[in-house]
Amino acid sequence: MGYRVAVVGATGNVGREMLAILAEREFPCDEIAAVASPRSTGTEIEFGETGRMLKCKNLEHFDFTGWDIALFAAGSGPTQIYAHKAAEQGCVVIDNSSLYRMDPDVPLIVPEVNPDAIDGYKAKNIIANPNCSTAQMVVALKPLHDAATIKRVVVSTYQSTSGAGKAGMDELFEQSRAIFVGDPVEPRKFTKQIAFNVIPHIDSFLDDGSTKEEWKMVVETKKIMDPKIKVSATCVRVPVFVGHSEAINIEFENEISARQAQDILREAPGCLLVDKREDGGYITPVECAGDGATYVSRVREDPTVDNGLVLWCVSDNLRKGAALNAVQIAELLGRRHLKKG
């Protein structure tokens, strides 16, 4: 006996990826609904490799009564209106927006990192999916924290344009083509030219000079892992279509060598260590696209602090950073709380 699952925002990058991953992982669905905005009502979306097509239902009129799980990938605006409605109608919401992440009554979950926190979902019937850049980082950090206790993290991100949705990917493609043929380049989605450039600005600026994306990495890491960890982040948009990369400096309370860290990461859930000290002995965004793992490379000791390490972390932001993590939350929820049959 399976579940009745609705994917809200099914026509977007993350929504389509959620449908693909539900099919790929053979999530036990008795019924699946693709739900989207009124303008997408009736649009057909493929579900699985069998060629089965789903017709999008109108979110404004969708009744969540009797549905077990709703995977929301609709953005904060629609989520603010409809997630609470779905939760009140008895459907457990797994939300990919930033709306509920810091709500103390809503668990913020990465299943490999803090699975026990999911037990608090009944307070609001809502579970939050973390920011894409946070999700991959904590998968790499958690096993190291368990081994040697992390004091401080300094992270610089290299985030792909897919993190800004289809419009971000389209802008990279259109600007690249325009530059090659000598046409003018007009930024629309991003604040500056993204093709052949990097932009140290994701989301809005805060009073202290950081951006909201950087703030998310700080507060979400504390909520998911340990409130005592100090985090400093610089988030940068780069001309890559899919896959976020991160250079992470870590300071520990206890001694840990690069070799010990490699051994730990090699066995850590959700991680794949690819760390050969030779040309090409590391993973880049092109190689991680379409994969669900968090890849770790370039593990080495940081000589500027006591008990310090440096590493390189890469993951497909549409999968582990969003859709895959949401489906893994649904699987965890099913095992612990919504058992069928």
Image (cartoon, rainbow, N blue to C red):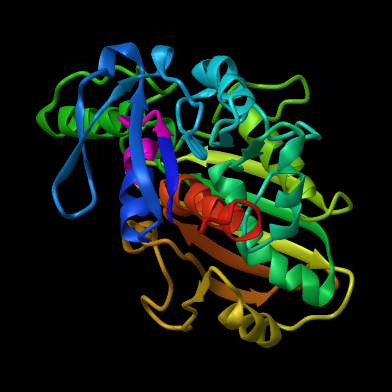
* Residue 310 rendering spot, x and y as whole percentages: 66, 68
* Residue 175 rendering spot, x and y as whole percentages: 24, 28
In this view, 95 is above or below 252: above
**Quadrant of the image for the N terminus?**
bottom left
| Total marks placed | 0
Would residue 147 be found to the left or right of residue 141 on screen? Answer: right
In this view, 142 is above or below 22: below
Q: Is 170 or 247 nearer to us in this picture?
A: 170
Q: Is 338 or 273 nearer to us in this picture?
A: 338
Q: Residue at x 38, y 21 (%)?
A: 189
Would residue 73 be found to the left or right of residue 128 on screen? Answer: left
* Residue 306 rendering spot, x and y as whole percentages: 85, 72
Q: Is 98 or 89 nearer to us in this picture?
A: 89
Task: Please indicate, yes or no, whether residue 211 appears anywhere in the rendered image.
Answer: no
Instruction: Name which quarter of the figure residue 203 lies in.
Output: top right
In this view, 195 is above or below 152: above
Q: Residue at x 57, y 52 (%)?
A: 329
Q: Residue furthest left?
A: 181
Question: The magenta stretch spans which residues?
Answer: 7-17
Task: Please indicate, yes or no, whether residue 143 appears anywhere in the rendered image.
Answer: yes
* Residue 183 rendering spot, x and y as whole percentages: 15, 21
Instruction: Name which quarter of the figure residue 239 lies in.
Output: top left
- Verify whether residue 100 appears in magenta: no
Q: Residue at x 31, y 39 (%)?
A: 16
- Verify whether residue 8 appears in magenta: yes
Q: Is 258 or 39 nearer to us in this picture?
A: 39
Q: Residue at x 41, y 43 (%)?
A: 160
Would residue 189 be found to the left or right of residue 40 on screen? Answer: right
